[in-house]
Image: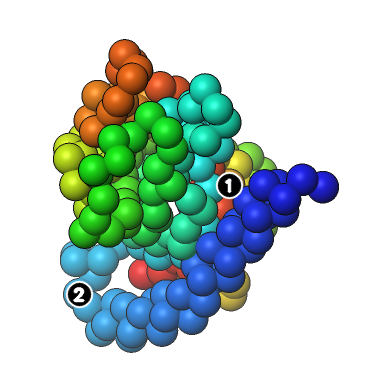
Amino acid sequence: MKPESMMAMASVRRAFARGTALVALVGVAASVAHAQAVTAPKQIMQDSWRISGTAGAYVPRSAMIVGADGRNTQLGAAPSVSLELQYLANRRISIYASGVGAFSTLATGTAIQPTAVGPSNNVTLIGTTGGLVLGLFGDRFQPTVRIGGGLKGYLFDLKGATNQWRPTGDFGVGFRGAGTGPIDISAEVRYLPSTFDQGKLPLRGIVPQAQAQTDLMFTIGVSIRP
């Protein structure tokens, strides 16, 4: 296996380990939320709503700028979190609104100006999406399909870079398992296709274009059903 592939796999493993470590915190938050929901008036929290928190890994599959010498400018794998509100239209269809965040770093290639350094290479990705989550079959255990879209934001800390927001799709497959109480567990792979405007980075020697981005998110989490 090539050293680059080994390093990429190691980055993914580290990112997923950091992300899944956050699930314990999500579980604590879920327990607190449930304790509050039990005492909440029925008119405030209805059975048709689900609140979910997840943690996991963000894995970019495309370079932002492909270098002619193989030194690409690209984001690294990173831990991710999300918070989601779902309205259960019926047993199989849920309408969702989701906010996601990932905390990555930018590896600069030969297309970036040498003077573009600091204060850090940190990049925060923020997404806000909405759409449908379909429960395919089953009651206590349901395979799910996600279909939606929204916006993806890139917030840079690199000198000379400009923050940007781009339209994104939000597609996923996973499952959710309902326990005997109000808490569900879930796992999902989400695909967030978009483009990236290279002109927002401090470039040299290339004509900027809209570069396709194929980002994945691997998540596990818990949901509260009042």
What residue do we see at 24% from left, 43% from top? 115
Disc 1 marks a residue whose amino acid type is Val
In the rendering, which numbered label is found on residue 41?
2
Q: Is residue 51 above or below residue 129?
A: below
Which residue occupies 49% across, 81% down? 24
- Where residue 110 appears, as percent x and y from the top left, is 42, 33
Badge 2: few (under 14), some or many (20 or more) residues near its Cα, within 10 Å? few
Q: Is residue 27 left or right of residue 115?
A: right
75 is higher (above) or lower (below) than 82: above
Q: Is residue 13 visible?
A: yes
Q: Position of residue 50 (x, y in %)?
A: 38, 59
The disc placed on residue 115 is none
Q: Quadrant of the C terminus?
A: bottom left
Quadrant of residue 121 in the image?
Answer: bottom left
Q: CA distance from mark 2 to mark 1?
A: 35 Å
Q: Is residue 146 visible?
A: no
Pointer 2 or 1: first along the chain: 2
Percent x, y for residue 56?
51, 62
Q: Which residue is mark 1?
A: 189
Left or right: residue 72 compared with residue 9: left
Tell me whether the residue at label 2 lies in contact with that at label 1, contact meaning CB atoms closer than 8 angstroms: no
Residue 144 percent across, percent down from the top left: 59, 44
Query: What residue is rendered at 40% in x and 61% in y?
Result: 81
Q: Nearer the viewer, residue 112 or 219?
A: 112
Question: Which type of secondary structure does the marked residue at label 1 adopt?
Answer: strand
Q: How many marks?
A: 2
Question: Which amino acid lies under the numbered mark 2 shown in the image of this protein?
Answer: Pro
